[in-house]
Image (cartoon, helix red, strand yellow):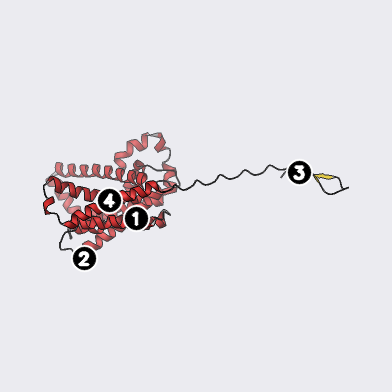
Amino acid sequence: GACALSPLMILNESYSSRHAHVIQNDWKGLSIIAVMNGFQIACNNASLTVMELSMNQVIRAAIPVLVALIAICVESKVPSKAEVACLAVISIGVMLAVWEESKNAVLGIVLTVVSSVMQSIQMSVTGRLMSGKSGKLNSFQMTFYTGPIAFATLLPFAFITEFNIFVESVTNKPIASLGFLLGSCCVAVVYNVVLFQSVGTLSSVGTAILGNVKIVLLLFLSSLILGELTGWSANQFLGCVLTFASAGAYSYIKATAPKPAPAPAPEPAPAPSQQPRLEGPGHGYIKQEGV
């Protein structure tokens, strides 16, 4: 991400003039986001080697609820009862839509839970940081600053576990291997830019809901195009209806919620009095000096 966005971040004066200020004020938040992002992706990918995708998606369907709970502490955003109800129904709907009978290892479940919690923390911290001390950061800045930290975090683990496989792949199929790496890096940059932009535009909870709707929508459309809807169970159809209806209800609640009143402007201090003040009958007056 940092390499791909370097020309923009270096040549553009509005970005290059703020590097020192952003790093000085927001380095802690950027580090947390980068580390959480790297490890949550690693844990999620590792879980898929020992468990079925359906169970992975069932667990990750609870991310909107986790994000809302974490946002109470991190972003000081307390959801209403109606919002909490919508989030719970959305999660249940996704679980019903993607659930399939399968054998799953305990390790895969643990890795998926850890990944879900880390992603929830990452999204909530991102929502707070994008309007942090150094001013409002955009998606390009977030991707640029967090990319190197995430890379450095995962590099030791990749070196220990996959170095021999990488060397063998590059030796035997250099063009295919480098093309795969370059393509994956480009996709990762676009994904992170879109993710950060969504958090900045919709909020952390809204982005989590969007992710759940995306899962169900892709599942429904793929089954529709491939002619597999006839094999769907009633629970899967019910899950789709619950997900879409609850997401719409949540959007309506947020759109119609009263906006918080702006903070009142401080009243100007009264001007010091320069008028003479009488001290009493027969005593003349004493001029009061301004403060």
Q: CA distance from mark 3 to mark 4?
A: 69 Å
Q: Residues within 10 Å of mark 4 (few under 14, many from 20)?
A: some
The single residue placed furthest to the right in the displayed view is: 282
Q: Which residue is mark 1?
A: 67
What amino acid type should be assigned to the residue bearing mark 3?
Glu
Q: Does residue 88 show up?
A: yes
Q: Does residue 159 show up?
A: no
Q: CA distance from mark 2 to mark 1?
A: 24 Å
Q: Which residue is mark 2?
A: 106
Q: In the structure shown, which secondary structural element does the residue marked by tag 2 occupy?
A: helix
What amino acid type should be assigned to the residue bearing mark 4?
Ala
Q: Residue at x 33, y 36 (%)?
A: 7
What amino acid type should be assigned to the residue bearing mark 2?
Val
Q: Residue at x 41, y 49 (%)?
A: 257
Q: In the structure shown, which secondary structural element does the residue marked by tag 3 occupy?
A: loop
Q: Which residue is mark 3?
A: 289
Q: Residue at x 34, y 53 (%)?
A: 122
Q: Residues within 10 Å of mark 3 (few under 14, many from 20)?
A: few
Residue 235 percent location from the top left of the image: 19, 58
Residue 204 percent location from the top left of the image: 35, 50
Q: Residue at x 27, y 60 (%)?
A: 113
Q: Earlier in the sequence, mark 2 or mark 1?
A: 1
